[in-house]
Image: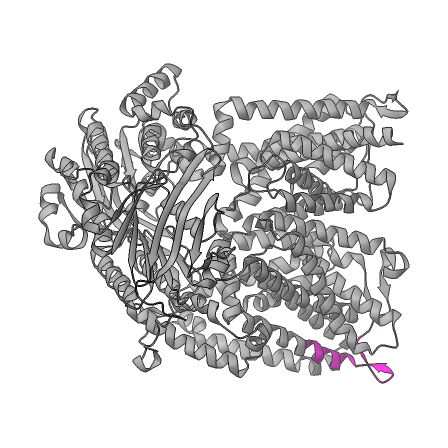
Amino acid sequence: MVNKFLLSGWAIRALALVAIAAVVLYPFWAKHSSNPESNLSVLIIAFTSAMLTMSLNICMGYGGLMSLAHTGMLMIGGYASGILFTRYYTINSWYTLPAALVAGVIFSVLIISVSLRATYLYFGIITLAANLVVMEIARNGGDFSGGENGILGISPPYIGDNPISPMTFYYVCLAILVAVYLVQRNTILSGFGRATMSLRESSETASALGVSPSVQRVKIFAISGGIAGLAGGLLAMQSTFISPDVGDLNGGLIFFVGLFLGGIGTLVGPLAGVALIALIDFQIRFSGAYRTLILGGILLLSMMVIPRGIVGTYRASRWGEAKEHDVASEDRDENIITTSEIDPRGEVVLDVRDVKKHFGGIHAVDGVSLAVRAGEIHAIMGPNGSGKSTLVSCLTRYHSLTSGEVGLFGKPLPRTPHGVARAGVSRVFQVPHLFDRVSVIDNVLTGMRIHEKYTWLESTLRLPRYVKETRAERRQARALLALTGLQTKEELSAANISHGQKRLLEIVRAVATRPRILILDEPATGLTQPEMETLHNLIVYLAGHGIAIVLIEHNVDFLLGLADIVTVLEGGRVIAEGKPDEVRNNPVVIEAYLGRTDLIEESA
Amino acid sequence: MYAQALVDGVFSGSIYALIALSLTITYQPTRIMNFAQGEAFVLGGAVGFVAIGKMHIPWPLALVIMIVAAAIMGYIMERMVMLPVQLSGSRFAWIIATLAAALIFQAIWTMNFVGDVLSFKPPLDKSYSIAGAVMDFQQIAAIVISLGIIIAYDQFLRRTLLGRAIRATAHNSDTATILGIPTRRIIVGAFMLSTVVVAVAGFLWVPEIGINPASGLAFTIQGFTAAVIGGVGSPRGALLGGLIVGLLASFADAIFGGLSANIGVFLALGLILVLRPAGLFGKPMEGH
Amino acid sequence: MSLLQIENLTVSYGGAEALSNLSIHVEEGEFVVLLGANGAGKTTTLRTISGLLKPGHGKIFFDGADITSMPGHKRTKLGIGHVPEGRQVFPDHTVMENLQLGSFPVHRDASKASIINDVFDLFPRLAERKTQLAGTLSGGEAQMLAVGRALMGAPRLLMLDEPSLGLAPRLVAEMFGYMRHLHKEQGLTILLVEQQARMALQVAQRGYVLQRGQVHTEGPSAALKTDPAVVAAYLGRTA
């Protein structure tokens, strides 16, 4: 009984309110304490830690980018502030703050441009190396950087002839902390955030949804770096100095502990984690090497025992989990399948001319030509290794063509996977690429990213254009979910729906991109009979609205029951093409692929 | 001057190659790059420092003690890293766990050797003069031993069933298990062997150039860079990568001096990763 | 005493309960099939038997011995062979090397040699491609390799997880033919997980239908083939 109350939403909200009140009123208590400056300082430094942890959360937790350079970013922000403050007195001291932010952005953009092609492992190593190099530069920077001792004499910004009082600086830092939290929150809870999370899952999926992986990486890392730099600037002002040691990875351990303890990939996790670890750290901060041992031990233990962190574990538990609920039909926009331009039925939208794809000696696709028409269900059939998936990968630019040409809506095929997606070709992969950690409706909304017009700034500040577009999107997403009977499950985590529902959701997400061509790679795998009927009806519905469907399937009856035209591949070549009945009875096709299914029945 | 840079570069390169090899040994069955590897390097130096330098134990016995200590450290590291990785399910678990392990061990070293530079006298303190450069016996021994270990491991991988099983374990540890391959034993063995190899590397290096107890991470980075340049998962790549890093740093230091060595290596790393994301010998890295 | 006996097995996976109080048994020499939709727990069952997943409750007995806490690789030595879902051949190793990697549980070189010959007799196409990299094999060939590799461990119980997945209809028929051969001619005990319900019920003697981690229906194949609920859900126009 007590448990239920403690973990209920109300208790948590009450606790949060108390914590916020405590933080806001803290300076008044500190003023009357025995050591006001030191007490204020502790919390201010905790604020900067929280900012840094949130910045790590953004790039690692949501963006999937492992960064070991964040202590370096902290340091660079501090140096930018420090150098500006102590060397260029004539410039208003308040500019030191944006300077720190910009320094962080520049540093992170530098790192990421070098490592754009790196997989996430190499990326982590590069960030580690970058961190060490930048510390080295600071150490050896002579008079400019103050060498081993760094720069002294930094202080909070001035008003008039004096720096602002510690209490005022406390509130400045608190305000910035709140702002950073809001930036984190508004960035993540928006199309930009969903695009970032798609990147976390895989580059492939992100591209298929029209997100350019490189561009998204640069943006998210820059945002993360800017926040880290800003935190560094504030830290330097509070400590009144900056030195190369600030960049030390050892010091960075505490941020990782806070992040993992609180819950990586959650909005509130970093705050909760930092709050908790700050309390612990306060006790052990003078213990030298023992501090590292204790923090390291806590980190390893929390990874083993509460792998999702406090907030993450709560969310995944029975109390924190989202529930099914009904959605009123007025909240749906029935007019959803409006492709940007509807091609006249029968018009050739995808023209494949003698395409070849060779991998060394293997001729995976060896001269395939076919034409896909609007509103038509064009099936591609053939044994494994016949080139079906390779062909589709070539058409979506995951592979380059060895030779041949592809025309898309009469123009040459765009050069990049995300370019192809933006041109109106959506693909559902053979292997599920659903965003498991995200809700059902958010999966669908991610599909709509491709048509979103608002900028990051508009979404972060929640300006009218963002609000209007988002509202319209939600209504459209609900209608799409209703097409497949998933409408009551919109808030559920995508991991918690059945396999068949997951397959359908992935197709819905692809439809949300408002494609003119939809490629389905073995969508019926693992579906029960009733689910296959839903899928059948959905495909017919979509084709009826003018979308061209390319269907690859091994379930012969399902495929032949749907297709308008079938192309049969074997060994990378087209061996037959025609209407389903023609193909079914074609002896070449039977020999190569269908076999005589009566055989097994006979010998039973 | 260049002859000396060459000699020093080959020496340091062969040591970096050993570190890179040890990273490969752990990487192969687990797909994990162990950030804590360099801490075993410090172990090698520390055991030598205490056993030979302070307790005057003859070096063969000290070597044996060091190997045993390294094996134990390897086992402990395996638990510190693999338990969080298996229980956490986060894709970053291994980076965080190995980093935490590195910092924990680093703290242990700095606690016990406050202000010390770890160093001890080489078993044979002779030098030879070759083409204007001075070459110590220790350097020759290091190069020969390093080469021997790398060749031996390379042959083991290629020719034995167990060697092939190790690569298979990395590709799909579940499938390896159901085929009857003792994956847990292989992983523990890999951690222990790699730790011993790195400790030996430290043991070979320290009589030549003393080290700071906190320098584990720096050596790990050198080893990483070497492994990445040569291609992770390949002993030959480790050798080549190590030599490249060693020679590059050595010549950069000779010509430009100062921190150019580090930056030069970093730039080389960046360049190679941009041009050939899989390194010189490696296959493209698959994620977890 | 059954060769394989599972009692009240409960397994949690990813925070959800994948198997709830599952009990099934397989007698020596039998051919049993597990049917059910994706997510019903079929693959989870096989993986738990192989030791890849730990049950929260329940026991597993093989040939009378309690293997519930035995490490996975030791179970293979006891005689449990497993052909995993999706074939999972090692793409960077040759066909021959893949097969050799399956022979870990077998100690004597003479036995290894004789088993390899048996495998090549059964799958002549694999013999033709001995030195080919497994990653370049077609789906059907890779499936044969996966089965052959499992046979290299000299299993007494062979478990196969959806061997027909993704195969051309012609090859699916072939694969079922191989399984029937292994069962009838070589007396191998087989536990098969399949989506192709109709064909599976042709070759298997007995079956279980799993739903949400529990046994929903069980019985001889003949009975399942005519059970209206089973027909409606799994035996539609297709499989």
Q: Nearer the viewer, residue A404 or A599?
A: A404
Q: In which quarter of the image is residue A78?
A: bottom right
Rendered view: B196 above or below B258: above
- State the residue lying farthest toward the bottom: A160
User: Is residue A206 in view?
Assistant: no
Rendered view: A346 above or below A458: above
Q: Give the range drawn in magenta.
A: A155-174
User: Is residue A527 in view?
Assistant: yes
Q: Which of B28 and C90 is in front in this view?
A: C90
Q: Quadrant of residue C62?
A: top left
Rendered view: B277 above or below A420: above
Q: Position of residue B1 (x, y in %)?
A: 89, 32
Q: Position of residue B64 (x, y in %)?
A: 68, 25
- How does the figure colour the protein chain or chains? one colour
Q: Position of residue C215 (x, y in %)?
A: 21, 50
In the visual, does A594 lie left or right of B181?
left
Q: Position of residue C212 (x, y in %)?
A: 26, 55
Tell me what residue is drawn at x 73 percent, y 46 percent: B266
Q: Inspect the magenta stretch and tell me whether residue A159 lies in it.
A: yes
Tell me what residue is drawn at x 81 percent, y 36 percent: B250
In the visual, does C221 lie left or right of A556?
left
In the visual, does A98 lie left or right of A258?
right
In the visual, does A383 lie left or right of A90?
left
- How many circles with numbers are drawn on the protein? 0
Q: Inspect the magenta stretch and tell me whether residue A418 lies in it.
A: no
Q: In which quarter of the image is residue B68?
A: top right
